[in-house]
Structure formats: structure tokens, C-alpha cells
Image: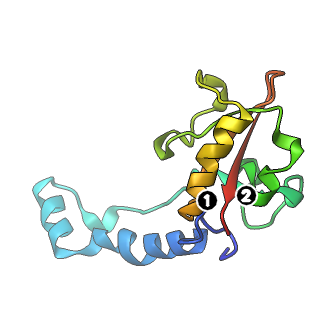
Amino acid sequence: MHKWIGPNRRDSLLQKIEKLKNKQLPLLHTPETNDMLKKLNIEGNRILQYSCYLANLFVPHSLKHKNFTYVNNDCIVGYWIKFEAFASKKYASGQFHIPIKQNWVVAPKYCDNWFSYSDIYQQLYLQYLQKKSPLLWMNNGDGSYERFFVVWW
């Protein structure tokens, strides 16, 4: 689980699970929560806590067709590549968009604003210099789309 890292390598799925387990779920048992639950006529000891991660997972491009254990493989929605790989001719004919983080879960087919490779390359290069790993949507021109991160590391 520790290998499922964020695009900028600052966090991991395991860290998120540990935070939920050790910090967020125990909030139910704090005095402040108990006081609020009493005011609402709710018995805190009768509350069952469950969690469900609705995640979008990305794998290295070379592993995009592999099945993984411990995760729901239906959550794998894309891949990641290094900045240098994006410079290859493979991507030169695509149309691209860099969604803001709040739109990462949106399907690329709803995007109306696509950029050429040369335009998006300039944006990517600036983010690369700042050690940021943006998400890219690629419109393949045939009604299909790809999602991938271009990582700086």
C-alpha cells in the first residue's frame, strides 16, 4: 500500500488510511463529539464507522494493463510518465488539457478547451521547473481520452 503515492510524492494511500484510522475516526470518541451527540439525542456507542475510498489510481505507463492486489482495479483510470517521455513524438498529435485539482474526477469528455502539444508543452515545462506533476487529459480525436500525470521526478 505504501507504493501508491501521490503525483508529487508527498503522500501515499497508506498515509491517508493511517490518518483516517488514527486521527479522523477516533474523533467520534472525543468529549466534544459526545457532548454534541447528547444534544442531538444520539448514542455515540451505537454508531458504527465504515470508510470507503472513492479513488482514482494511476500506474506507471508500463504497467497500465496489469492487475494489482489490495486495490479495486476498476479504480485505475490512468497512468503516469516522466516529463522526458512526454517530449517523445508519441504525444505530438494529441490535444491536451490540464484540469484544476477540483476537476480531476471529471470525465475528460466534458472538456471544451483543448490545447495543442506545443502549447501544453510550454505549460508542462513551467510546472516541471517548479517540481509539480500535473494531470493531463489527452483527446485522441476518435472519441477516446487518456488521463495521465506527467511527473517531475
Question: Along the horizontal axis of the image, is 84 left or right of 119?
Answer: right
Q: Earlier in the sequence, mark 2 or mark 1?
A: 2
User: Given contact means CB atoms under 8 Å apart, are the residues at marks 2 and 1 in contact?
Assistant: yes
Badge 1 amino acid: Tyr
Residue at 87% from the left image edge and 59% from the top image edge:
63
State which quarter of the image contains the N terminus. bottom right
Closest to the observer: 35 or 6?
6
Question: Along the horizontal axis of the image, is 129 left or right of 30?
Answer: right
Badge 2 amino acid: Phe
Instruction: Rate crowding at label 1 as few (under 14), some (14 to 19) or many (20 or more) other CA atoms within 10 Å.
Output: some
Q: Quadrant of residue 96?
A: top right
Which mark is on residue 128? 1
Label 2 belongs to which residue? 83
Residue 35, position in %: x, y? 12, 66
Closest to the observer: 102 or 57?
102
Residue 48, position in %: x, y? 41, 62
In this picture, is 52 found above or below 104? below
Residue at 77% from the left image edge and 53% from the top image edge:
73
Closest to the observer: 51 or 152?
152
Q: Quadrant of residue 81?
A: bottom right
Instruction: Rate crowding at label 2 as few (under 14), some (14 to 19) or many (20 or more) other CA atoms within 10 Å.
Output: some
In this picture, is 139 found above or below 21? above
Closest to the observer: 57 or 7?
7
Residue 79, position in %: x, y? 76, 53
Residue at 34% from the left image edge and 74% from the top image edge:
26
Q: Secondary structure at mark 1?
A: helix
